[in-house]
Amino acid sequence: MRATWRLPDGSTQTADVDAGTTLMEAAKANGIPNFGETCGGRLDCTACHVVVDDGWLAKLQPVHAFEDAMLDQTTARQEASRMSCQIRMSAALDGITVSVPKA
C-alpha cells in the first residue's frame, strides 16, 4: 500500500506503508521532511497534524473527542485535519494523500 505526503514547499513524497502502520510512523520511517512527532504517537502533541485530501476523509475512522480537542490546539486546523498518529494504514487507504501544514 502507498501513501503520499504533500509537503509545505509543494513537493510530494510517496512511500510504501504496511497495513496497521500509522501514517506518523510511516512518515518518520521514510524520512518525510518537515514532519514531526514529539510524543511517540500517544496523542500528547500536535506535531503530526496533517490535512487529509478530498475523498479520503470519509474512509477514516471518525475523529474521537480527545483527537478533536488536540486538533483545536493547532494553528492550522482545517475541516479535514487529523492527527496522523491516529490514521492506521489499511487496504481501504491505499493511495491516500495528506498535506503537512507549515510548522
Image (cartoon, grey):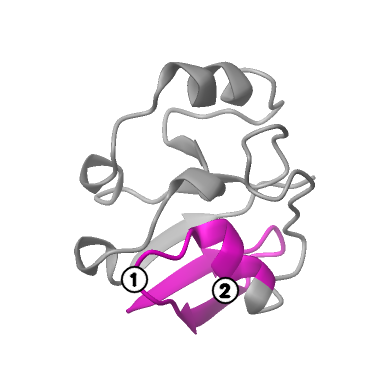
Does the magenta segment cover residue 16?
Answer: yes
Residue that numbered label 2 is attached to: 12
Q: Is residue 5 above or below residue 79?
A: below
Q: Residue at x 47, y 44 (%)?
A: 86
70 to the left or right of 78 = right
Q: Circle 2 — which element?
A: strand
Crowd class of label 2 (few under 14; some 14 to 19; many from 20; radius 10 Å): some
Q: Quadrant of residue 39?
A: top right
Residue 75's spot in the image, x, y percent? 71, 26
Does the magenta segment cover residue 70?
Answer: no
Q: Is residue 66 above or below residue 31?
A: above
- As shown in the figure, which amino acid type bears the numbered disc 2? Thr
Q: Nearer the viewer, residue 40 or 57?
A: 40
CA gap, disc 2 to disc 1? 21 Å
Residue 27's spot in the image, x, y percent? 61, 68
Residue that numbered label 1 is attached to: 19
Q: Residue at x 50, y 21 (%)?
A: 68
Q: Residue at x 21, y 69 (%)?
A: 91
Which stretch did the figure color magenta?
Answer: 1-28
